[in-house]
Image: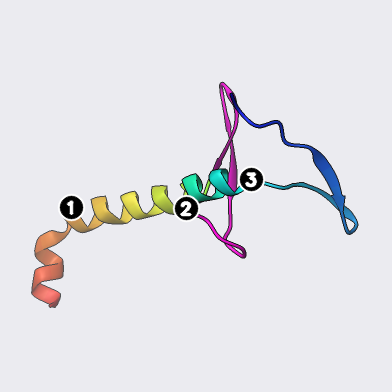
Amino acid sequence: MPDALKVRKIGNSLGIILPSPTLEELDVEEGDALFAIQTPDGIQLTPYDPEFAESMEDAREFMRTHRNAFRELA
């Protein structure tokens, strides 16, 4: 059964406290960034930046397309 998380006042903001097992499952520690992604099922928290992942995939595709030019430049 999932843990119920309570929204609390933290300074001038609102936040939630994640239980240790959840932090371990996400493989995050204090100071790490989490990204909230809107999905059809609700909000998903992930330590991976989806925009960065998409940019990296675009870069990989560009490098595959221009592989011979990169070999010549090396």
Give the label, 2 or 3, closer to the camera. Answer: 3
Q: Which is more N-terminal, label 3 or label 2?
A: 3
The residue type indicated by label 2 comes to: Asp
Residue farthest right in this picture: 12
SS of the residue under disc 3: loop
What label sits on residue 19 in the rendered view? 3
The amino acid pointed to by label 3 is Pro
Residue 61 locus on image (x, y percent): 25, 50
Residue 27, numbered label: 2
Which quadrant holds the N terminus? Answer: top right
Seen at 52% across and 56% down, the residue is: 28
Q: Does 68 appear in magenta?
A: no
Report the magenta residues as a range. Answer: 27-45
Mark 1: give few (<14), some (14-19) or many (20+) Cα within 10 Å: few
Q: For this rendering, which residue is in front, 29 or 37?
A: 29
Amino acid bearing label 1: Thr
Q: Is residue 12 toward the left or the right of residue 27 in the image?
A: right
Disc with the residue nearer the chain's start (1 vs 2): 2
Give the side of residue 74 with respect to residue 46, left or right. Answer: left
Q: Are marks 2 and 3 in contact (CB under 8 Å)?
A: no
* Magenta region includes residue 41: yes
Pointer 1 and pointer 2: residues touching (CB < 8 Å)?
Answer: no
Dot 2 alpha-carbon crowd within 10 angstroms: few under 14, some 14 to 19, many 20 or more: few
Residue visible at 56% across and 43% down in the picture: 22
Residue at the spot of label 1: 65
